[in-house]
Structure formats: C-alpha cells, structure tokens
Image (cartoon, rainbow, N blue to C red):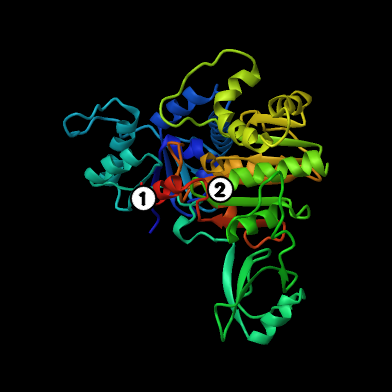
Amino acid sequence: MPKTYVLDTNVLLHDPRALFVFEEHRVVIPMAVIEEIDNQKRRQDEIGRNARSVSRMLDALRAEGPLSSGVALPKGGELRVELNHQEAIDFPKGLDPHKPDNRILALALNLSKDTASPVILVTKDLNLRIKADVMGIKAEDLQIDRVRYQGLYRGFCELYVPGEALASFYTGHPLAWDQEPLPCPHEFCILRNSENPSQSALCRYFNRALHPLRHAEANTWGVSGRNKEQKFAMELLLDDSLPLVTLVGSAGTGKTLLALAVGLHKVIEERVYDRFLIMRPVVPMGDDLGYLPGTKEEKLRPWMQPIYDNLDFLFRACSDSRHLLDDFLRRGTIEMETLTHIRGRSIPNQFILCDEAQNLSPNMVKTLVTRMGEGSKLVLTGDPEQIDHPYLDADSNGLTYLVEKLKAEKISGHVMLTKGERSGVAELAAKLL
C-alpha cells in the first residue's frame, strides 16, 4: 500500500533531492514549508542555495499540473502541496497552533484521520519527532544518506597467515592475497602468524597483494606515527598517488596534526603541490559571536584558531617561527578559507585539508570533492561524535557518508584513529565524558 510522507522544511534544506526519493509513495509538502523555504531563499550559504533549488524544482513540476491537486513524480509517486487540513486541532496545552512546526504536525495528524494509508512525518528535528510520537503520528528522519556509524569501515583489519608466509613478508616481498572476502583497496592489515599470534607485521592491500608500509618510520616536520593507526594515516597522507584521504577519530588522536605536518612537508619542502589550502566549516559550538569586524583574515581567525595552534606547534622548532609562518600566509603558500564560497571554484595542484568535516552535510561534501582539480589531494578529518550542526548526527553527516561510499574505490584511503596521544587527561576525557 502506498504511504504518505509529509516533509518538514529542514529535510528539503538539508537535501533538495528528498522530493524524489520516496519511490511510488505520495509526498506532501505543507504550505507552512513553502513559507519557510521562501524565508530562507536570500541567504548566501548552503541553506539559501538549497532553498532556491527546492523552489526551482517545485516550479518545474508545475508544468505537470496544479501542485495543489498532485503531480506525478519520475519514480511513480505523487507530489502535492497541501492547502487543506490547516484548521486547528486540539493541541496539548502549551503548543502554539500558529507555530510552523505545529502547523506541519496538525496537517500530518489530520491527514492520518482522512486516509487509510500510513502517514509518516519526515523531519530532521528531533523535538518535532518527539511531539509527533506523543500525538500518535509516526515520524522518522530522512534515511537516504544515513550510515551506521557504529559499524563504520575502520580502514584496517587482522589477517592470519602461516609462519613461512610471514617470514617471507619480513624480507620485504609483497604477499599475494586472493582469499575472500578481499580487503578494500588501500585497507591496512595486521598480519599475524597463525601458529604464534604474537608475531605480526603491518601491511597495506592494493593490486591484489599485501605490501609492506613504505612510510612507517617517516618523520615530517618533527611528527611521526606513535601508534599503528597513526602510522597507517601517515602512509596514506604521504602517498601522492592517492588523491582522497579521510581520517576519523576522537579528540586528541592526532588526525589534524598529522595532516598539517604532511601538508607542510609536501608544499614547502618537497613542493609537490603549489599551495596548502586549509578549510573548516563555520559552525559554532554554543552561542554564535555574531558579526566580527575587520578583514577577511581577522574574521577567520576565531574559526581557524585550532589550526593556528597546531601550526604554531609545528613551526616551534624553526628559528623566528612566528615570522616564518606569517610569511607563508602572506605569500599565499598557506591559505585559510571557509567553505562558504567554495561553490564554483576549481582547485588544481593543491594540498587541501578540510578539518571538522563531520559538520558538513553529504551534499556539502559532494560540493567540496567536486571542486578538486588535476593534481590536488584532499584530506578530510573529523570526529562524528562531536557534531555542532543542529540537523546532523553521527549517522547522517557528510564525513561518515563519504567514508562508506568510497571505501571500495581505488582513489581513496581511510583510517579510523582510536588511541589518544594529546595527553593522558585528554584521552581519559574522550573515553569517559
């Protein structure tokens, strides 16, 4: 039986394609949602662009007939903008019937009374889902871009081999591997002796063979891998043939510091890339500071302060480190940027680091990755358990979505870092708090 899905505003502002993902089912857009989208269309950020995209899509569908009566969708469903069912209902005490969220709730409740088919409210607003549940309306999050974070691909596994095979691997020769299930491209493996598991070796899978690590003991800008996950990360970061790398880990695991150290090494010392471009989403934790005066660099400074802290640490070993870092920034060898103005750009031959990528939606990650030009390398780092975006969580953010979608592709590599190296206090806090 076809279902009826009532879409909340935040679903369409998160991903305009949500209009077309419900297959043969009916999609209802409340008039309150159209009003809220109209209020967002002048914004110059991702939300504004998505609002304008939704408006254009709905306008194009008008060619199929009146939206109030319902128009056919490409996959066999139907879409309509609901004008009726706006009359007030007996709301629980304290709920304002004129509030847009409650108007959407009323519409879903009245629709469920008028139709025999299931009515489901789709919203990314947790509180609205709770209110819907209290009022007997089925509600769910948008499922098309959700990835189960608890089972996210780690980027490494354990394999057991006979002692003679491990002995041969110790001599530096790759070990052919065709046993199913095959590891993902560029997945790291901990080889263990099947007769004596305490004997082990680290390797990387590609071209149907297990290869010794080439950069296990690398030291770039005074930074080297302290544990096996960091050694795996260095292997991916230092490989110029790998254009896309994702590093996921909790606070203090070293993902940002490792990426910064390798970026400086590749741009300044080896000159493999023309520029080191560092980006962060502008998503505040807690109350926003509001308007910030000054130049672009002065406005960016509070958002980029964690990057400056790490750069100061890396340049500390250099004489006149403060002057040297400022000089690289002034000449554009190192550039700080937000993702606000990334659309439309083409970025060739640059080492690009996007920090705090867990605050990006899947659509924003797609926009970023499609900006890469020839010869560029993109590194995304983040912790899906520390998300500041109001409508994203560990399962729906762009970083976990990218990891899952590209894990089987030869152009990308991924490592999940688990051991904190910042300090004993920081690691204990990440585990217990």
Picture quarter containing residue 82? top left
Residue 352 against residue 4 in the figure, above or below:
above
Report x, y in % for residue 384: 48, 47
394 on left or right of 154: left
In the displayed orientation, state which residue is furthest to the left: 93
290 on left or right of 263: left
User: Where is mark 1, residue-wise?
Assistant: 432
Q: Amino acid at mark 1?
A: Leu
Residue 338 against residue 419 in the figure, above or below:
above
428 on left or right of 292: left
Residue 363 against residue 210 in the figure, above or below:
above
Q: Amino acid at mark 2?
A: Leu
Image depth: mark 1 or mark 2 in front? 1
Which structural element holds mark 2? Answer: helix
Which structural element holds mark 1? Answer: helix
The number of discs equals: 2
Front one among 141 and 67:
141
Residue 94 against residue 410 in the figure, above or below:
above
Please report whichever mark, 1 or 2, sits nearer to the chain's N-terminal start: 2
Mark 2 surroundings: few (<14), some (14-19) or many (≥20) residues within 10 A: many
User: Where is mark 2, residue-wise?
Assistant: 399
Res 403 seen here:
yes
Report x, y in % for residue 273: 80, 41
Front one among 109 and 153:
153
Quadrant location, the N terminus: bottom left
Report x, y in % for residue 23: 50, 54
| Residue at 64 percent of width and 19 percent of height | 296
